[in-house]
Image (cartoon, grey):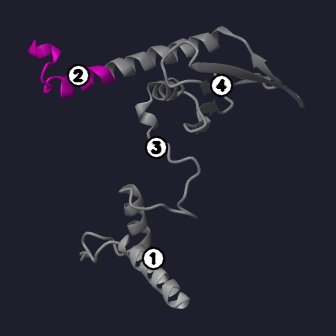
Amino acid sequence: MFKTKKLLVFFCIFILSLNSCGFYKRSDVKDNPVNVEERARKNVQEGRGIRFGKGATRGGDFDFASSNSLWRASVEILDFVPLTNASYSGGIIITDWFSSEKQEPDNSKELKITVRFLSNEIRADAVDVTIFEKICSMNNCKTNKVKSKLEKELKLAILKKATLFEKDAGKRYFDEKGKNRKGSIKDK
């Protein structure tokens, strides 16, 4: 008697767990890719699954950097120098060592710029610009953190450019969406 109740409970749980799988749904090859990788990518994009292992990312994908005005402005302002590290998820941009002036054969001076993002908002304390200087003579190199006007000028240029990007995005949004909304400013 006790075994039968156990078997009945197990059978009911088993049936209920199968119910969550859904009903059979016919699918066509043109709707679902045959390749396993493509099918898994499509399911993850549609929010119907998760992925572990090779395709998994830690912390998520940060492919939306183009929507952040500060990030876009910084990349555009620093386009004159190659970047060593540009990590949107880490909130940092680091340039490679560069030199803009003609070098003397026995003495070289190079700069490296680091931009850290402390906030996504466009404000004075949202961006931290640091400049490092490397001076190399015959067989001796020294690296120092430098306080200069260039830090403030770069920070100001980034903030100005980000403000323009933000203003342009707001204007575009109003032009596209604002005209079609009932009760918008243009309707009144």
Depth check, mark 1 against mark 2: the one in front is 1
Q: Helix, strand or loop at disc 3?
A: loop
**Which amino acid, by three-letter code, is at mark 4?**
Ile
* Tag of residue 128: none
In percent of width and height, residue 118 lies at 59, 24
How crowded pointer 4 is (Cα within 10 Å; few <14, some 14-19, many 20+) is rated as: many
Q: CA distance from mark 2 to mark 4?
A: 36 Å
Highlighted magenta segment, given as a residue range: 169-188
**Which amino acid, by three-letter code, is at mark 2?**
Phe
Precedes in sequence: disc 1 or disc 2: 1
Is the Cβ of the residue at disc 4 closer than 8 Å to that at disc 3?
no
As displayed, is residue 187 above or below residue 39? Answer: above
Residue for point 61% across, 36% down? 90
Depth check, mark 2 against mark 3: the one in front is 2
Q: Which residue is mark 2?
A: 174
Precedes in sequence: disc 2 or disc 3: 3
Q: Report the predominant secondary structure element of the magenta stretch.
A: helix
**Which amino acid, by three-letter code, is at mark 3?**
Asp
Is the Cβ of the residue at disc 1 closer than 8 Å to that at disc 2?
no
Q: CA distance from mark 3 to mark 1?
A: 42 Å
In the rendered structure, the answer to whether residue 70 lies left or right of residue 146 reads left
Precedes in sequence: disc 2 or disc 4: 4
How crowded pointer 3 is (Cα within 10 Å; few <14, some 14-19, many 20+) is rated as: few
Q: CA distance from mark 2 to mark 3?
A: 25 Å
Q: Quadrant of the C terminus?
A: top left
Q: Which residue is mark 4?
A: 113
Q: CA distance from mark 4 to mark 3?
A: 23 Å
Looking at the rendered structure, the number of numbered marks drawn on it comes to 4
In this view, which residue lies farthest toward the top?
A: 149
**Which amino acid, by three-letter code, is at mark 1?**
Ile
Q: Which residue is mark 1?
A: 13
